[in-house]
């Protein structure tokens, strides 16, 4: 009988939680990378929050398409390209990632081996945003056209 009352009390305690103690709402993040314009737009819940210059691949990479983040690494080094640093990397497809770069003078034109490079501060902001809101709520569209992709 005592177990019943303890269980009942615990169940009621969950129902009587103080108002305002719920988890914060999460936002949807929509990232568009325009390879023609060498720019990235980041929208949160349908409103553009950031627009940054990027450098994409000299040979056209990453492939155009719609993606979700596959994994995130705060500090990563490319095994394929002489252990080049890839800070705040958000991997999107077959090793392609959005990440920070020290080659900020090259932003705004194709310069990478295929990844999407950002200013280190912008990469850190994007990484923190995706981490806080969740990879499952993030969509990434990479496009060649001068017209930005829509949802």
Image: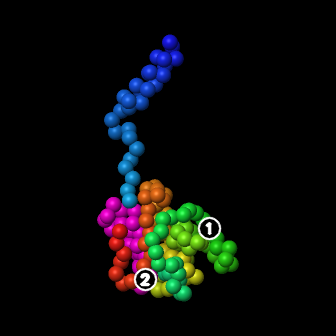
Q: Is residue 44 magenta?
A: yes
104, 93: nearer the viewer: 93
Quadrant in the picture for residue 33: bottom left
Bin the neighbour count of mark 1 within 10 Å (Cα to Cα): few under 14, some 14-19, many 20 and up: some
Tell me if I can see residue 104 in this picture: no
Q: Is residue 107 magenta?
A: no
Quadrant in the picture for residue 22: top left
Bin the neighbour count of mark 2 within 10 Å (Cα to Cα): few under 14, some 14-19, many 20 and up: some
Q: Secondary structure at mark 2?
A: loop
In the rendered image, residue 38, in percent from the top left (x then y), is placed at 43, 82
Using residue 17 as the reference point, say whether residue 104 is left or right of it: right
Task: Quote the CA–CA distance across marks 1 and 2.
Answer: 27 Å
Judging by the rendered image, the residue that carries numbered circle 1 is 76
Seen in the picture, residue 110 relative to 134 is either above or below; the reply is: below
Q: Which residues are magenta?
A: 29-52
Mark earlier in primary sequence (1, 2): 1
Please name the residue shown 68% across and 73% down the image: 79
Please name the residue shown 37% across and 49% down the image: 25
The rendered magenta stretch, by its main secondary structure, is classed as strand
Q: Secondary structure at mark 1?
A: loop
Q: Quadrant of the C terminus?
A: bottom left
Judging by the rendered image, the residue that carries numbered circle 2 is 144
Which label is found at residue 26?
none
Using residue 83 as the reference point, say whether residue 120 is left or right of it: left
């Amino acid at each position: 009988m005592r177990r019943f009352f303890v269980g009942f009390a615990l169940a009621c305690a969950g129902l009587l939680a103080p108002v305002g103690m719920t988890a914060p709402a999460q936002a949807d993040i929509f990232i568009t990378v325009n390879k023609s314009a060498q720019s990235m737009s980041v929208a949160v819940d349908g409103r553009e929050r950031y627009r940054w210059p990027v450098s994409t691949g000299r040979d056209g990479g990453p492939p155009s398409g719609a993606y979700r983040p596959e994994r995130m690494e705060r500090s990563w080094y490319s095994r394929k390209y002489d252990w080049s640093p890839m800070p705040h990397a958000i991997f999107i497809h077959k090793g392609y990632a959005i990440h920070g770069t020290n080659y900020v003078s090259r932003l705004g034109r194709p310069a990478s081996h295929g990844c999407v490079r950002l200013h280190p501060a912008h990469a850190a902001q994007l990484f923190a945003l995706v981490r806080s809101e969740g990879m499952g709520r993030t969509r990434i569209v990479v496009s060649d056209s001068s017209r930005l992709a829509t949802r």
